[in-house]
Image (spheres, rainbow, N blue to C red):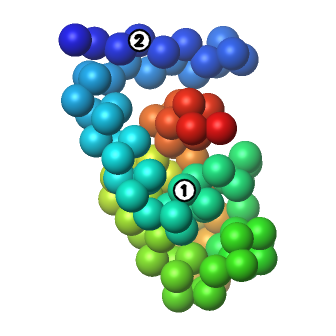
């Protein structure tokens, strides 16, 4: 079964299998920290901003972001920079965030 999701703003359309959607949903919901980070990422943000909004340590924030990137739910906007990295949601992450809110 294929799920077609069209976002409210008409700019993002994502097609994914039902199995993939539920895998991502389960991954986020199994971790309170993952859910926290996913829900506060409304736009691009520095790791320090995410840390401040979630009250997680810098190490926890970095670990959670790494996991979200590996799952394809978030991306680093400036991976070549070692300081001041900016993260944001991918279309897949944005879709999941809207369903969880």
The C terminus appears in which quarter of the rendering? top right
Task: From the image, tell me which residue sits under label 1.
Answer: 35
Where is residue 7, by image quadrant? top right
Other residues around mark 2 within 10 Å, as few (<14) / some (14–19) / many (≥20): few
Decide which of 101, 14 is in the foreground and name it: 101
- Image quadrant where one finds the N terminus: top left
- Along the line of sight, the residue nearer the viewer: 78 or 72: 72
Mark pair 1, 2: CA separation: 23 Å
Image coordinates for residue 57, horizontal then vertical, percent: 62, 87
Q: Is residue 55 visible?
A: yes
Do callouts 1 and 2 mark residues in contact (Cβ within 8 Å)? Answer: no
Q: Residue at x 28, y 23 (%)?
A: 18
What x and y, as percent, mark residue 94?
57, 37
Q: Is residue 76 visible?
A: no
Q: Secondary structure at mark 2?
A: strand
Can you give x and y, in whole percent of width and height, for residue 20 in the image?
27, 33
Relative to 63, residue 75 above or below: above
Residue at the spot of label 2: 4
Percent x, y for residue 41? 67, 53
Quarter of the image for residue 22 reads: top left
Q: Residue at x 69, y 16 (%)?
A: 8
């Amino acid at each position: 079964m294929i799920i077609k999701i069209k976002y409210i703003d008409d700019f993002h359309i994502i097609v994914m299998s039902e199995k993939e959607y539920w895998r991502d949903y389960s991954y986020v919901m199994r971790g309170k920290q993952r859910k926290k980070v996913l829900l506060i990422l409304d736009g691009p943000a520095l790791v320090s901003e995410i840390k401040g909004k979630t009250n997680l340590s810098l190490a926890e924030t970095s670990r959670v972001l790494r996991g979200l990137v590996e799952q394809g739910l978030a991306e680093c906007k400036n991976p070549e920079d070692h300081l001041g990295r900016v993260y944001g949601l991918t279309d897949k992450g944005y879709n999941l965030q809207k369903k969880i809110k």
